[in-house]
Image (cartoon, helix red, strand yellow):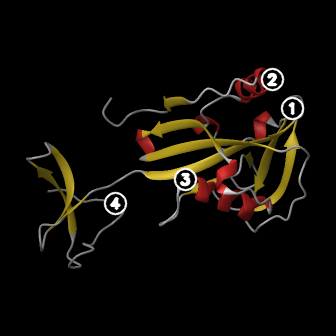
Amino acid sequence: MSEIAGQKFCYDCGGPLCLKWHALDQRERRICDACGAIHYESPKILVWCSAYCGDKILMCRRAIAPAFGLWNPPSGFVEEGESLEQAMARELEEETGIRVPPSGFILFRVASLPHMNQIFVGFRTEFASEPPFNLGHETSEARFFSEAEMPVEELAFRDMVPDTTAEIFRRLREKDFEVRILTLGASPNT
């Protein structure tokens, strides 16, 4: 039995959780010392959006940690009771004030980050003209960047982005929006 970080108490009875070997699954699991309930650790799901207008891509300057002051596409965690598209519509509106219906997003990327226990689901959406912004508290600035203007050295989470900015702009120029499934970062089992 070993100590664990994160969740420490059972949702069922409030007893302490410990990492214990689970013979049926052949791996360690979070198991309650009091009632024996197994607490599975499912990945967190995040959505992000490659929103573009002509040859420019929308980026948001973060006004919150982590990566305060750096740029990233509109993104965030999926909340309980939301579809992926609903989460993307909410995140885009929260960060930029731009409203796009959930049906306005097209699947673009799915990236597994097993070392972080996260899954990123990327969408794309196109604007005929640059919409006005009404920034939320998480964003200090939003803007559409051309490839030449993109502040590459100021991008947040570069090690977690499924495509380089050059690759994103290439795909945009070529209208190559093939859905790709990727694994990023180190796997905990390697």
Question: Residue 52: horizontal and vertical position, in percent?
Answer: 80, 40
Give how far across and how far down residue 182 sits, in percent.
50, 30
| The disc label shown at residue 132, or none | none
Residue 91 showing in the rendered view: yes
Element class at badge 4: loop
Farthest residue in the front direction?
A: 103
Q: Does 106 sit left or right of 97 as displayed?
A: left
Q: CA distance from mark 1 to mark 3?
A: 26 Å
* Residue drawn at x 21%, y 53% as measured from the top left: 29
Q: CA distance from mark 1 to mark 2?
A: 7 Å
Of residues 56 and 29, which is closer to you in this image?
56
Q: Quadrant of the N terminus?
A: bottom left
Residue toward you, 119 or 153: 119
Amino acid at pointer 2: Arg
Q: Nearer the viewer, mark 3 or mark 4?
A: 3
* Mark 2–mark 4 distance (CA, rounded to whole Å): 45 Å
Kindly identify the residue that appears in the image at 77 percent across and 60 percent down.
99
Question: Helix or strand or loop: what does disc 2 sit on?
Answer: helix
Q: Which residue is mark 3?
A: 84
- State the residue position of label 4: 5
Image height of 55 relative to 61, above or below: above
